[in-house]
């Protein structure tokens, strides 16, 4: 326990990070993170990178940077301190490989800005997009409700947070929108707005957009890897494209008809028409 506290001391972490930056040799050419909502095929995407030699791809590795159990600890300073530990892990893990890839939907929520400063011109981003209705159904089905259930509070954004880009008052002040599914829809739009803001704020960061359905499209996947300037084994890639993972079929707490879900999405868009700007 005492040894662990020393290893996680901020001064020790800063010194370790400095060593990995300037002293310890590193072969890493790029650090690639994924900007996405989750439940979007990020685990499937991670498996595609097994066709990329001399790379390491991790799906939500420690420290994940999810929300702390005590909501009073949620702050920029908290996540900055957590990222200090994460940056050491990333550099230490990736230094023996040409490419470090991490599929972690906490990236756009909690550490994208820190990553820009930390990895600078070696940072690249994949914008992975699943349609809002399918994503919301998936979260609703497994009981991950933003700001409400245990896993929703830990892993997703909170509609009551002051730094949200999409005003969520309608979820609490209008009885027509108090269904939990609207929270899941709101979460998709809030995440996409944050991604769009990141793109606008950092035009120098290479960002490749790919839709979940396009993970089944070999030419599109090849274009992504070419854009990221990665060498890959075509034969291995052909075997991987089209395989699905992380279906969570054993977790089905809620259900909603697709037609009803689409109607609810349209109701939300009619009430908040500015949300349509991220649907292209």
Image (spheres, grey):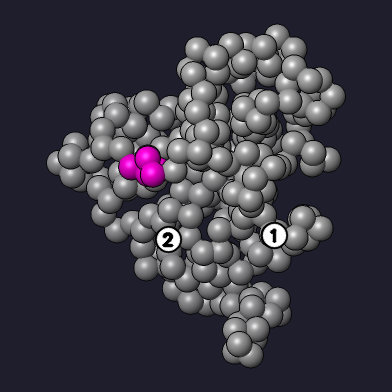
From the viewer's side, name the closer residue of 205 and 93: 93
Judge whether 186 appears above or below 277 on screen. below
Q: Which mark is residue 69?
A: 1
Q: Is residue 271 left or right of residue 141?
A: right
Q: Residue at x 42, y 60 (%)?
A: 28
Q: Residue at x 48, y 55 (%)?
A: 60
Question: According to the image, label 2 marks what residue?
Answer: 28
- Residue 192 visible? The answer is no
| Label 1: how many Cα within 10 Å (few below 14, some 14–19, many 20+) | few
From the viewer's side, name the closer residue of 63 and 202: 63
Q: Percent position (x, y) of residue 189?
A: 64, 27
Q: Say which quarter of the image contains residue 226.
A: top left
Judge whether 1 appears above or below 167 on screen. below
Residue reaching furthest to the left? 235
From the viewer's side, name the closer residue of 74 and 91: 74
Q: Is residue 233 left or right of residue 76?
A: left
Q: Percent position (x, y) of residue 118?
A: 62, 58
**The stretch drawn in magenta includes residue 164:** no
From the viewer's side, name the closer residue of 54 and 45: 45
N-terminal of the two: label 1 or label 2?
2
Badge 1 vs badge 2, beta-carbon distance below 8 Å: no
| Label 2: how many Cα within 10 Å (few below 14, some 14–19, many 20+) | some
Quarter occupied by the C terminus: top right
Q: Is residue 246 left or right of residue 53?
A: right
Q: Residue at x 41, y 56 (%)?
A: 58
Secondary element under disc 1, as helix, strand or loop, is: loop
Q: Which mark is residue 155?
A: none
CA distance for labels 1 and 2: 34 Å
Quarter occupied by the N terminus: bottom right
Bounds of the magenta segment? 245-250
- Residue 14 visible? The answer is yes
């Amino acid at each position: 326990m005492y040894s662990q506290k020393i290893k996680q001391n901020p001064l020790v972490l800063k010194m370790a990070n400095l060593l990995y930056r300037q002293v310890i040799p590193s072969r890493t050419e790029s650090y690639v993170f994924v900007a996405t909502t989750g439940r979007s095929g990020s685990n499937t995407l991670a498996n595609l990178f097994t066709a990329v030699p001399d790379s390491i791809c991790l799906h939500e590795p420690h420290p994940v940077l999810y929300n702390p159990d005590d909501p009073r600890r949620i702050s920029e300073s908290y996540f900055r301190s957590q990222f200090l530990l994460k940056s050491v892990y990333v550099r230490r893990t990736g230094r023996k490989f040409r490419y470090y890839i991490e599929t972690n939907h906490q990236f756009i929520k909690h550490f994208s800005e820190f990553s820009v400063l930390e990895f600078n011109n070696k940072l690249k981003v994949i914008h992975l997009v699943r349609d809002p209705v399918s994503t919301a159904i998936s979260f609703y089905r497994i009981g991950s409700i933003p700001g409400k259930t245990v896993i929703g509070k830990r892993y997703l954004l909170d509609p009551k947070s002051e730094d949200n880009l999409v005003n969520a008052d309608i979820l609490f002040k209008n009885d027509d929108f108090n269904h939990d599914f609207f929270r899941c829809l709101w979460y998709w739009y809030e995440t996409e707005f944050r991604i769009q803001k990141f793109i606008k704020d950092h035009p120098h960061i290479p960002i490749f957009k790919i839709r979940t359905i396009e993970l089944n499209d070999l030419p599109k996947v090849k274009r992504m890897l070419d854009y990221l300037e990665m060498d890959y084994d075509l034969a291995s890639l052909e075997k991987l494209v089209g395989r699905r993972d992380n279906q969570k079929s054993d977790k089905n707490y809620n259900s909603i008809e697709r037609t009803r879900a689409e109607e609810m999405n349209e109701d939300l868009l009619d009430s908040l028409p500015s949300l349509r700007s991220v649907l292209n």
